[in-house]
Amino acid sequence: MSGAIMGELVRFGVSMEEKLLDKFDALIKEEGYNNRSEAIRDLIRKAIIDSEVKREAGDVVGIIPFMYEHDRNGVTRKLLEIQHKSSNAAFNVHFHLDRHMCLEVVILKDEASNIRGLADEIRSIKGVHYCEILMTKPVVHSDEEHEHH
Ligand code: NI
Protein backbone atom coordinates (compact mmCIF):
# COMPACT_ATOMS: atom_id res chain seq x y z
CA MET A 1 0.00 0.00 0.00
CA SER A 2 2.69 2.50 1.04
CA GLY A 3 4.86 1.50 -1.92
CA ALA A 4 2.41 3.19 -4.26
CA ILE A 5 3.22 6.62 -2.82
CA MET A 6 7.01 6.22 -2.91
CA GLY A 7 9.53 6.01 -5.74
CA GLU A 8 10.44 8.58 -8.40
CA LEU A 9 9.58 12.21 -7.68
CA VAL A 10 7.05 13.87 -9.98
CA ARG A 11 6.56 17.66 -10.20
CA PHE A 12 3.11 19.21 -10.41
CA GLY A 13 1.70 22.74 -10.15
CA VAL A 14 -0.74 23.93 -7.50
CA SER A 15 -2.84 27.11 -7.74
CA MET A 16 -4.17 28.81 -4.63
CA GLU A 17 -5.02 32.25 -3.25
CA GLU A 18 -2.01 34.30 -2.20
CA LYS A 19 -3.30 34.83 1.34
CA LEU A 20 -3.75 31.09 1.84
CA LEU A 21 -0.25 30.42 0.53
CA ASP A 22 1.22 33.09 2.85
CA LYS A 23 -0.41 31.39 5.82
CA PHE A 24 0.83 28.01 4.65
CA ASP A 25 4.39 29.33 4.29
CA ALA A 26 4.30 30.78 7.80
CA LEU A 27 2.98 27.50 9.16
CA ILE A 28 5.57 25.27 7.51
CA LYS A 29 8.38 27.61 8.59
CA GLU A 30 7.17 27.27 12.16
CA GLU A 31 6.98 23.48 11.81
CA GLY A 32 10.56 23.34 10.54
CA TYR A 33 10.08 22.28 6.95
CA ASN A 34 12.75 23.26 4.41
CA ASN A 35 10.31 23.76 1.56
CA ARG A 36 6.70 23.47 0.45
CA SER A 37 7.26 20.13 -1.27
CA GLU A 38 8.21 18.44 1.99
CA ALA A 39 5.23 19.92 3.79
CA ILE A 40 2.78 19.00 1.04
CA ARG A 41 4.16 15.44 0.91
CA ASP A 42 3.55 15.08 4.65
CA LEU A 43 0.01 16.48 4.36
CA ILE A 44 -0.84 14.14 1.50
CA ARG A 45 0.66 11.17 3.32
CA LYS A 46 -1.35 12.00 6.42
CA ALA A 47 -4.57 12.28 4.41
CA ILE A 48 -3.93 8.91 2.76
CA ILE A 49 -3.13 7.21 6.08
CA ASP A 50 -6.22 8.74 7.73
CA SER A 51 -8.38 7.49 4.91
CA GLU A 52 -6.80 4.02 4.91
CA VAL A 53 -7.03 3.71 8.67
CA LYS A 54 -10.75 4.49 8.54
CA ARG A 55 -11.34 1.60 6.14
CA GLU A 56 -8.68 -0.73 7.58
CA ALA A 57 -10.04 -4.22 8.27
CA GLY A 58 -7.33 -5.25 10.74
CA ASP A 59 -5.96 -3.61 13.87
CA VAL A 60 -4.73 -0.04 13.94
CA VAL A 61 -3.14 1.97 16.74
CA GLY A 62 -5.50 4.24 18.63
CA ILE A 63 -4.39 7.07 20.91
CA ILE A 64 -7.13 8.57 23.06
CA PRO A 65 -6.27 11.51 25.33
CA PHE A 66 -8.97 12.71 27.70
CA MET A 67 -9.37 14.96 30.73
CA TYR A 68 -11.75 14.43 33.63
CA GLU A 69 -12.62 15.40 37.18
CA HIS A 70 -11.61 12.35 39.22
CA ASP A 71 -13.54 13.50 42.31
CA ARG A 72 -16.84 13.87 40.48
CA ASN A 73 -19.36 11.19 41.37
CA GLY A 74 -18.64 7.86 39.69
CA VAL A 75 -16.39 9.13 36.89
CA THR A 76 -13.32 7.12 37.84
CA ARG A 77 -15.31 3.92 38.30
CA LYS A 78 -17.09 4.35 34.97
CA LEU A 79 -13.83 5.01 33.15
CA LEU A 80 -12.28 1.89 34.64
CA GLU A 81 -15.27 -0.25 33.72
CA ILE A 82 -15.26 0.98 30.12
CA GLN A 83 -11.54 0.39 29.75
CA HIS A 84 -11.62 -3.09 31.30
CA LYS A 85 -14.47 -4.07 28.99
CA SER A 86 -12.39 -3.25 25.91
CA SER A 87 -8.85 -3.87 27.16
CA ASN A 88 -7.24 -4.79 23.86
CA ALA A 89 -3.53 -4.54 24.71
CA ALA A 90 -4.18 -1.10 26.16
CA PHE A 91 -1.47 1.08 27.64
CA ASN A 92 -2.41 3.82 30.02
CA VAL A 93 -0.78 7.10 31.04
CA HIS A 94 -2.24 9.05 33.94
CA PHE A 95 -1.21 12.57 34.85
CA HIS A 96 -2.72 14.36 37.90
CA LEU A 97 -3.04 17.87 36.47
CA ASP A 98 -4.26 19.55 39.67
CA ARG A 99 -6.46 18.75 42.70
CA HIS A 100 -9.43 17.87 40.51
CA MET A 101 -8.40 17.28 36.94
CA CYS A 102 -6.70 14.23 35.50
CA LEU A 103 -5.26 13.82 32.03
CA GLU A 104 -5.23 10.27 30.80
CA VAL A 105 -3.99 8.79 27.53
CA VAL A 106 -5.07 5.34 26.41
CA ILE A 107 -3.02 3.72 23.67
CA LEU A 108 -4.36 0.52 22.18
CA LYS A 109 -4.32 -1.73 19.16
CA ASP A 110 -7.74 -2.68 17.92
CA GLU A 111 -10.08 -2.37 14.99
CA ALA A 112 -10.82 1.25 14.05
CA SER A 113 -14.52 0.89 14.85
CA ASN A 114 -13.75 -0.43 18.36
CA ILE A 115 -11.35 2.44 19.02
CA ARG A 116 -13.97 4.96 17.93
CA GLY A 117 -16.52 3.18 20.13
CA LEU A 118 -14.25 3.39 23.16
CA ALA A 119 -13.62 7.11 22.61
CA ASP A 120 -17.36 7.72 22.21
CA GLU A 121 -18.07 5.94 25.50
CA ILE A 122 -15.40 7.90 27.35
CA ARG A 123 -16.65 11.18 25.88
CA SER A 124 -20.23 10.47 26.95
CA ILE A 125 -19.39 10.26 30.68
CA LYS A 126 -20.36 13.34 32.71
CA GLY A 127 -17.20 14.81 34.16
CA VAL A 128 -15.08 14.07 31.09
CA HIS A 129 -14.27 17.45 29.57
CA TYR A 130 -12.11 16.60 26.63
CA CYS A 131 -11.62 13.48 24.59
CA GLU A 132 -9.76 13.31 21.31
CA ILE A 133 -8.93 10.38 19.14
CA LEU A 134 -5.98 9.73 16.88
CA MET A 135 -5.63 6.62 14.77
CA THR A 136 -2.56 5.60 12.88
CA LYS A 137 -0.56 2.66 11.60
CA PRO A 138 3.14 2.12 10.86
CA VAL A 139 4.28 4.16 7.82
CA VAL A 140 7.20 3.58 5.47
CA HIS A 141 9.18 6.75 4.66
CA SER A 142 11.89 7.04 2.04
CA ASP A 143 15.15 8.66 3.23
CA GLU A 144 15.03 11.90 1.18
CA GLU A 145 11.68 12.76 2.71
CA HIS A 146 13.21 12.96 6.15
CA GLU A 147 15.36 16.10 5.65
CA HIS A 148 13.46 18.27 8.09
CA HIS A 149 13.85 15.93 11.07
NI1 NI B 1 -5.28 11.87 38.59
Image (spheres, helix red, strand yellow):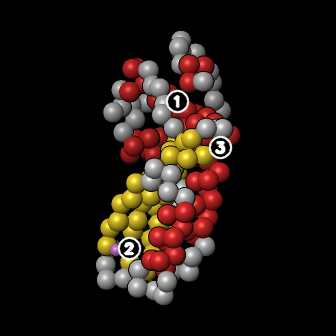
Q: Is residue 34 visible?
A: yes
- x and y percentages locating residue 78 in the rendered image: 52, 75
Q: State which quadrant residue 57 falls in.
A: top right
Mark 1 or mark 3: which comes first in sequence? Answer: 1
Residue closest to the far right: 55
Mark 2 or mark 3: which comes first in sequence? Answer: 3
Q: Nearer the viewer, residue 37 or 100?
A: 100
- x and y percentages locating residue 61 in the rendered image: 50, 45
Q: Secondary structure at mark 1?
A: helix
- CA distance for labels 2 and 3: 29 Å
Mark 2 or mark 1: which comes first in sequence? Answer: 1
Residue corresponding to mark 3: 54
Residue corresponding to mark 2: 102
Say if disc 2 is inside 8 Å of ligand 1.
yes
Indicate whether 8 appears above or below 122.
above
Locate residue 76 relative to residue 95 in the image: left or right.
Answer: right
The amino acid type, in three-letter code, at marker 1 is Arg
- x and y percentages locating residue 44 in the rendered image: 58, 33
